[in-house]
Amino acid sequence: MKKILVTRKLLRSCEDKALKSFDANLNLNDELYSQKKLIEMSEGKDGILSSLTDKLDAETINKLPETIKIISNFAVGFGNIDLEAAKTRGIAVTNTPDVLTDATAEIGILLILGACRRASEGIESAKECNWKWSADYLIGKQLTGARLGVLGMGRIGQKIAKIAKSLGMIIHYHNRSKLSEEKEQGAVYHDNLKSLLSVSDVLSICCPASKETIDMINKETIEYLPKGAVVTNVARGDIVEDEALIDALERRKVYAVGLDVYKNEPNLNPGYLKYKSAFILPHLGSATKETRTAMANLAIDNIDEFFKTGDCKNKVN
Ligand code: DGY
């Protein structure tokens, strides 16, 4: 039986599955392993079932024991892993696409609604019982008729676009390449970021974090947005230069933000906390029982497939 290290606590049924499939070292207390501890715990193991909280940079990967042949990430994103370093070491890296599309898109829509309709302020006032209804009380931005710019029209972006369209939004998107008409569903393609941002009353960041997308939303590119745009991010914090976005909130260039992901989680830039127009969530994208179960099961199946066939359809390096 192959030996694997599971770095974070999984839902019970998934831990049972891991124990049936492998000689699995579980993390029942859900301790956050340091890089040093993760390397030590990997001793004698054939694979690692990692999570987005494990920083598997080149230095850490280079210190992993020779026996490690696969890192199966319990996430669709894999910005926490240095893919090149893993490849050089002959370690396969896999992710969990598809199964979290719906849950993450739901949070993407919640961010748009929460930011546009001033949910943070509303919740605060409702709890304090200090509000008085009036014709202009907490007036927000209506989604119907507004233009949604989807940055990264992958599975999650497409699902967000579909729901947003049903809410009456007009969909624009930017991707490396234009999608088929069937996938576009009437959305307008922009072959460059500037063109997309200039029509985005609401921006939904859905692209993966990579060398090309890190800090893509920055001091310069924020200026391409219409004045009073709303910026939401359901993908990765690394794509946004926080200082620039916070400054744009201060200047009211940006009306509101809706964020589920941050650089350096959980220590988000405290600058956001000063703004009632910041609707912020603690990385809830895939947080439903159905989805977390499907993700963990897929992460386990990826390891199984890899050891049975020498390859895996969800290999990303
Ligand atoms: C992912 O899988 O990348 C999600 O962000 C996890 O919640």
Image (tube, rainbow, N blue to C red):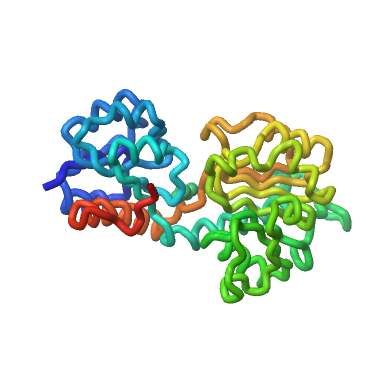
Is there any visible trace of residue 287 in the rendered image? yes
Asked if residue 272 lies left or right of residue 79, the reply is right
Determine whether 105 is above or below 4 in the image. Answer: below
Determine whether 62 is above or below 16 in the image. Answer: above
Asked if residue 73 lies left or right of residue 220, the reply is left
Residue 276, x across and y down, in percent: 73, 40
Q: Residue furthest left?
A: 1
Residue 281, x across and y down, in percent: 58, 44
Q: Quadrant of residue 33?
A: top left
Question: Which residue does the image show at 19% across and 40% down from the upper left?
Answer: 46
Relative depth, front residue between 232 and 177: 177
Q: Residue furthest top?
A: 36
Residue 120, x across and y down, in percent: 69, 46
Asked if residue 312 lies left or right of residue 146, the reply is left
Relative depth, front residue between 254 and 149: 149
Residue 53, x across and y down, in percent: 42, 37
Is there any visible trace of residue 17 in the rendered image? no
Q: Residue furthest front?
A: 88
Question: Which residue does the image show at 26% across and 56% down from the upper left?
Answer: 301
Question: Which residue does the image show at 88% across and 54% down from the upper left?
Answer: 136
Relative depth, front residue between 127 and 73: 73
Question: Which residue does the image show at 47% across and 53% down from the upper left?
Answer: 286
